[in-house]
Image (cartoon, rainbow, N blue to C red):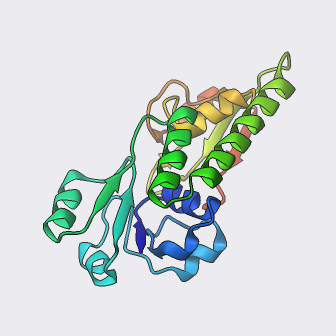
Amino acid sequence: KVISVAPNITETIYAINKQNTLIGRTDFSTNPKEVSSIPSIGSLTDPNIEKIAQLKPDLVIASNHFRMEDLKKLEELNIKVVVLSGPDSFESTYDVINNVGKILNANSKAASVVSSMKKKVAYVQEKVKGRSTPSVYYVIAFGKSGDFTAGKDTFIGKMITIAGGKNAADDTNGWKYSTEKLIEKDPDILICSNKLN
């Protein structure tokens, strides 16, 4: 019985066909759609420790944004936790998939998913070779809560580059941005996250 505390872990569990082990996920784990039937344990950065304990998992799998204090609380409750973290990169993503495969006894399926991803990346790189490089701004959120995009150090930022674009937000790290900077950059393409309401 597994609780995922990160969207990338949840998606990986589904990708390696181990969704039958999943008993909890975060509010941000919305892909694939079927995951909505799994109980949420709160947010990525503020999981509900009591809810996790009530679900009685054999294992909690977390990722980059998991806080040390939450790890300690779960360990005090004798709940096993694995934190799979690393830089936002394709190599790190491949490592996470392979490690989830090891943990859930799905090594060959994980290796197959990674191999398929590598082939897609190589295919895209070949297709965009020698073409023009449009500037791209990835819209994660905007408005009263702030403007958020994918900076140069993010996985999405790296995907834009691999896909033949120039990240309009390559002058920042992380996720925060400003409308003023965006207007100044005047990107060729805006890509909107499907999570925008």
Tell me residue 23's x, y (percent).
Answer: 45, 77
Quadrant of the snapshot with the C terminus:
bottom right
Q: Position of residue 166 (x, y in %)?
A: 68, 25
Above or below: residue 178 compared with residue 141 = above
Q: Quadrant of the N terminus?
A: bottom left
Q: Position of residue 74 (x, y in %)?
A: 21, 66
Residue 149 horizontal side relative to residue 161, left or right: left
Q: Quadrant of residue 25?
A: bottom left
Is any atom of residue 159 visible in this view? yes
Res 143 seen here: no
Quarter of the rendering containing residue 75: bottom left
> Which residue lies at the image location 86% right of the left edge and 28% below the top edge?
127
Residue at 28% over, 84% down: 54
Residue 17 higher or lower than 131, as above or below: below
Horizontally, is 122 left or right of 83 in the view?
right
Q: Is residue 20 above or below residue 185?
A: below
Image position of 141 (left or right of 162): left
Residue at 59% over, 39% down:
156
Residue found at the very far top of the displayed protein: 130
In depth, the one of 150 and 105 nearer the eye is: 105
Residue at horizontal 36%, vertical 50%?
A: 65
Q: How many circles with numbers are drawn on the protein?
A: 0
Asked whether 132 or 162 is in front, the reply is: 162
Which residue is at the front of the view, 180 or 61? 61
Observer-nearest of 129 and 148: 129
